[in-house]
Amino acid sequence: MKHDFLVAICVVLFAIAYLIGALMINEPNTSYSAVGPRFLPIFIGVGMFLSGVWLGWQAWRKKSDAKIDALEEMEWRTWGACVIVLLGYILAFETVGYLITTSVFLFLQARVFGSRAWLRDLVVSVALTALVYFFFNGLLKVGLPKGILG
Amino acid sequence: MDALTQLLANLGAGFGTALTPINLMFGLIGVVVGTAIGVLPGIGPALTISLLLPLTFGLDPTTAFILFGGIYYGAMYGGSTTSILVNTPGESASVVTTLDGFRMAKQGRGGAALATAAIGSFIAGTFATFMLMLLAPALVEFALKFGPPEYFAIMFLALTAVTGLAGESAPKAMFATLLGLGIGMVGIDLQTGQARFTFGRPELLSGIDIVTAAIGLFAIGEVLWMAGTFKRALEETIKTTGSLWMTREEWKRSLPSWARGSVLGFIIGVLPGAGATVATFLSYNLERRMSKNPEKFGTGMIEGVAGPEAANNASAGGAMVPLLALGIPGSGTTAMMLAAFQLYGLRPGPLLFAQRPDLVWGLIASLYIGNALLLLLNLPLVGVWVKMLDVPKPLLFGSILAFSVLGVYSNEGSLIGLLVLLGLGLLAFFMRRHGFPMAPIVLGVVLGPLIEQEFRRAMLISIGNPAIFFTRPLSLTILIFAILSLLIPFAEILWKRYRARKGQAAAVPTFGDEVD
Amino acid sequence: MFRRIVLILALVTIVAVACAPAPTATPVPPTAAPKPTDAPKPTTAPTVAAVKPTDAPKPTDAPKPTVAPSGPLAATKAGFPNKAMTILAPANPGGGWDQTSRLMQQVFVSEKLLPVSIEVVNKGGAAGTIGLAEFAAKKDPYTMMTMGLVMVGGILTNKSAITLKDTVPLARLTGEYEVIAVPANSKYKTLQDLIADFKKDPKSITWGGGSAGGTDHILIGLIAQAVGVDIKNVNYVAFAGGGESAAAIIGGQLTAGVSGYGEWKAQVDAGKMRFLAVSSEKKIGKDPTPTLIESGVNVSLANWRGIVGSPGIDADTRAWQIEALKRMHDSKAWQDIVVKNEWDDLFLTGDAYGKFLEEEDKRITAVLKAIGLIQ
């Protein structure tokens, strides 16, 4: 099975989901409006659907296929670890607070990307986090989450 | 003659104001802070000005605006750096720069790409300030001729730039563009107040921020890509050995691009409601059309960096025109500056030139000075930025992610915003893996809400008659340009095929397989 | 090479952290809020020496009696407040709520009205309903929230689960008025001319203003109702802000527009626009523009702003907060701000304010239903 054909199926399914979402938009019985809030979303959904059909048709006729040089040899373990650490960082960001999460995150992410110079990573992680925190909270008053330290 | 002496006297007084030690110092702080936040993803000039606003209440308004002007121009300089070096644009206006800038960096021409961006920005910024000084009132008259139909036509023209970003597969580019437009639909509809695609989450009511989209799709997507291909990525480390400076040939190729980018960017900037991102995409499209080798765009063409980078700085200068001359903001940053004017009890508009000449001319003079300072600051920095590539990859990638999260959080202040960021990063990763181009998505996110709102406004004004787009000369002209921009590539292909069939194939490069 | 970078980073950090509590490099005006750590605790002498060194009493001075109206308000019996307070501005920096919040903060601090410090936090989006949801969930008696007419409308159009009933009304502060404007070269010289054509062919008049369901739209809805035009035929073109719609009106793209008085005053002064009517009950200052009522349209609308307290605060705390707001309102600094911004002083507190909120909710619900934005 051509690879792009599967991609085309995904595109078509996404387009259908988007169209359903577009049809669920409330078209208000409002004051005068020539073109309502559904118009462009429906247009987009139909366009996506057609692009999926086009892609599928091309793949079916073997006119083209994606050049996915990385397809077989993705390093899913590194990738998965990177995503999980990032997700953990995001989820803990507000509750645990900026200083702790960012230091830990930078350190862990360096591990994920294969660094073993733990002392260097630790120093840089903590220093960079503190520097940024000072710049944002001290100078710009952004109000980064203090979390458990607050 | 009298007008000229008047102008020179005003400008002289302006430089007198701008060159006082305190103003000069704040101008310098402005450009340094501006460059810094330009380099950081997500922290744009509008956000920075809003954050600094409470701190400037004690300052003289002129000084405060000199600071803001420096931040605005500085951010436009800084924006290109990460785009070129690590393929992670910090703002939507520097997305286009990644296309050829990052390729140049991979070929060891990162220094040249940064230099052409800096010099282009200087030329564009100076040009825009000069035009602002000379022609502000006349330009405003011109800008006011643009109504919703004309804006729709411009957005449509910008959308045709997608043909230059398509990559290898037309249906994939089509889907990417539509997906971007679709993401732009999320949130409350301005015309009718209805929620769209919000899944009942109040945080999504204000829509998906362009900054979040650009960072998610590019910065997060890029790092996830690196994570998936890490061993190879380490092998093909980017060369930093090439000369930092531009070669004679690169100068020759950059010059016309700077000029075109400056003029185009300035015009788009003057129009309130178009914006810097639109200017960069239009400029990229223009450069591609003007080039003898359009098929090489996306492989490290210096014109693809010089043009858009000039355009985005010129549009910042252009946006000052309606702000100062009418009190109408043409970008997020100028909207913030308008709010600042109001907090100071000032009302920008034609009377501002008469009532507060010290402020207006001081600001104009300081924009000239700021531009010069930025060039002096940024050219030596080229060498420093390139060193960024020597930072060990594990730390660099982690930092890019951490800065992206920080930028989006300062912008949106919510967990949902961060989850959307991660979601877009994952989406970008999988789409890239399957050969979808990324830039059209950002183009779609930027243009989606604009094109829709302008279309519906025009249709309201015409009471539902679409003829409004074709009966107004300005709108019709732009639409014809847009259609030509769409058709010319196809016509070229047909023409070349025709010639090839006549046996002259050797004379022209065929790129038929590229467009199927 | 890399070791050097690490070293520099570490050094910079140490310096930065060491400098953090000291005054920052960016000059802070004397009126800016003190950092929470600077705030004098109510148990210590309630002078606010840390805020304005020039006014600091000499060490020999005995602390003034805390009941004096000029001094900070004393804490309640239950000891409220004993830490820094917060004003939540449910908008992004730059807007009207943000401006009101920051100016309140400025007065609280410069007039030394509170025994503790007070800071402004922004939580923008969706007509303030996102900030409202957070405010109601937090139930923090130390936080007060700025709000106004736009939030009343936003709660309805966004179908917000949290409403103003989940908060405690404290005070209405100011109001700004709306204007009906046309381009300077428009054929319409008076509101009556415009309304006459509006009645004849409603769709032919294009009105420009802010987002659907906002104050501008609500005013057009009220006017249409008052002059007997079917709201469904009103041709309202929404723009993202007063600036964008101003460009469209001056450029002659629209027939008329609606926005805040202050927002477009500069355009009128510059001869680009003409005001036809204001939405206030009396003329604004020395401006000769007639009111809607004077022009024969029986509508008045104030884009009012006020402040509410956290759900569940006890009566003492509420009374304390109202008293603090009253002292802020009565100060000369606040009165100057009101005049300078051409606001109307609409001060109203406590239960009277609560009653006003209920009435306003009814009125806005009716208009939005008529416009068709809510069912």
Image (cartoon, coloured by chain):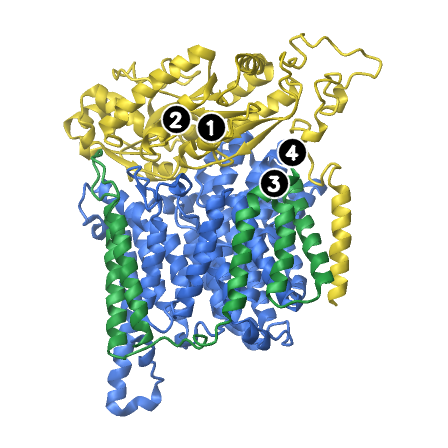
Chain colours: A green, B blue, C yellow
Query: What residue is disc 2 on?
Result: C163
Q: Which mark is residue B59?
A: 4
- Distance of label 1 from label 2 (alpha carbons): 9 Å
Chain under numbered label 4: B
Mark 3 and mark 2 in contact (Cβ < 8 Å)?
A: no
Vertical placement of residue A147 versus C141, above or below: below
Q: Residue at label 1?
A: C136
Q: Chain of mark 1?
A: C
Question: Mark 3 = which residue?
Answer: A147
**Kind of residue at badge 4:** Leu
**Is B37 left, or right, of C97 in this rendering?**
right
A121 lies above or below C288: below
The amino acid beneath tag 3 is Gly
Q: Earlier in the sequence, mark 1 or mark 2?
A: 1
Which residue does the image show at 33% across and 74% down from the upper left?
A: A3
C-alpha distance separating marks 2 and 3: 28 Å
The residue shown at (63%, 63%) is A111
Q: Position of residue B343 (x, y in %)?
A: 54, 30
**Position in image of residue C18 (x %, y %):** 77, 43
